[in-house]
Amino acid sequence: MEKRAMILDGATESGVDTRRAGDVAMDVFRRGGWRVDRLALREVDIAPCLGCFGCWIQTPGLCVIDDAGRDVARRMAQSDVLVYLTPLTFGGYSSELKKAIDRSIPNLSPLFRTVRHEVHHVKRYARYPRLVGIAVSRDRPIDPDEEELFEAVVRRNAINFYAPANAACLVPDGGDDEACRRTIERTLERVIGP
Amino acid sequence: MTGKGQHVLLLVGSPKGLEKAQSARLGRVVLDGLEKRGWTSESIHLHEAVRSDDGRRDLVASVARASVVVFSAPLYVDSLPAPAIRALELIAEHRPVETGNVPRFVSIVNCGFVEPSQNDTCQRILQQFAERAGLEWMRGVSIGSGGGTTRRVRTAFDILVEALDLEILVPDEVERLTRKPVMPRWLYILGGNVMWRRQAAKNGVKDRLRDRPYERRGS
């Protein structure tokens, strides 16, 4: 089966440039023979999640809002690796990236179970993508607290969405291209291999 | 009572709005307590505010004049709902670097899991926001079980209100009272699954709860 990766680019109007990091990730996947899609979420009209639970108890697995959010959720479900690319936003994801992630909850069941001594939702699908978070930070030097927080957010998402592997990194906006490339390559290799 | 001239702003980050959201109800407990002590208040629904130029402008202005900002939102995938993050981005971007007023900031996050601790990453994001936006971080209150309140949680809110009114640090007691799950995990799972199945049955989809519309097939 073809190996599929999807890069969700959560760039905002903040001016933080995610393109360089996205280009490096695209390059790594292509060299590895992956089919890779890259979506600039700022250009995609995705309505915010209504919090109605319709995707669980009215149209199971399908958001009740019929817009591009459905297509993104489908592509997320069918990927082998998901890359969350974002301007670092208070240690987490930008609003642009989050609008897509919020609309992916149809990919879980509403039912509860115990995972790692906590309540989580049951799987809807047999398999879920590996998860990589790449954040681009304006700060120099990078704030280690925010870096650790970003890694924690990705790790928590990986638990909730049954990602079989996960990794995260922070790269600066601008500066040394080669260092940025090495950081992203090393992070991706942790989940897709060399 | 020290509330004279003090103003509290409630920011609600739930799509369900100021009337129906559990987040609004939780935030309202703090507002009611402060109003009884002579404070004035206002509430903003963030999903509405970020949709228009006027809404965005009013949001930034309201934060600038508040003595205390109470932020209340549901946990969405280990963080906040996207429009709530958008609101934080706007506030941080437009807060003046030098300002005479530094509002105190309290966050209330409620999640649909039994463990309040599942809100931890979200609370840390909110703390980072407060620092970036030049607000004084006071305390994050994490509520589990879909925002249900118990006597312990109500006591925690009473202590929080008193601390905000007296302009003292929020005691650790608030965290101790809200940190513990309100019921055993097995009971929450059992009750929750009965509830989901009942709701699906009402909609005629009980047997479709495990549908896989996006199952990947072939190559």
Image: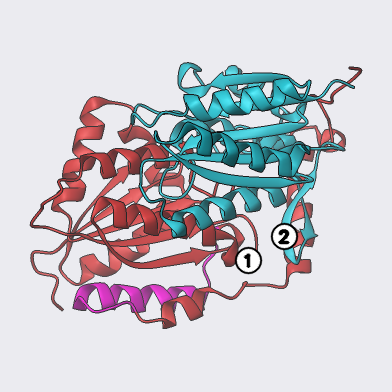
Chain colours: A cyan, B red
Q: Is residue A75 left or right of residue B124?
A: right
x, y percentage for residue B165?
A: 21, 74
The quarter of the image holding the N terminus of chain B is bottom left
> Which residue, given by chain and number where applicable, does mark 2 sit on?
A119
Q: Quadrant of residue B106?
A: bottom left
Q: Quadrant of residue A103?
A: top right
Tell me the kind of residue under disc 2: Val
Q: Which region is colored magenta? A: B147-170
Q: Chain of mark 2?
A: A
Give above or below for B22 relative to A49. below
Look at the image and tell me whether residue A74 can be seen. Answer: no
Look at the image and tell me whether residue A15 can be seen. Answer: yes
Disc 2 element: strand
Residues at discs 2 and 1 in contact (Cβ within 8 Å): yes
- Residue occupying the point 46% across, 58% down: A144
The quarter of the image holding the C terminus of chain B is top right
Q: Chain of mark 1?
A: B
> Which residue, given by chain and number where applicable, does mark 1 sit on?
B115
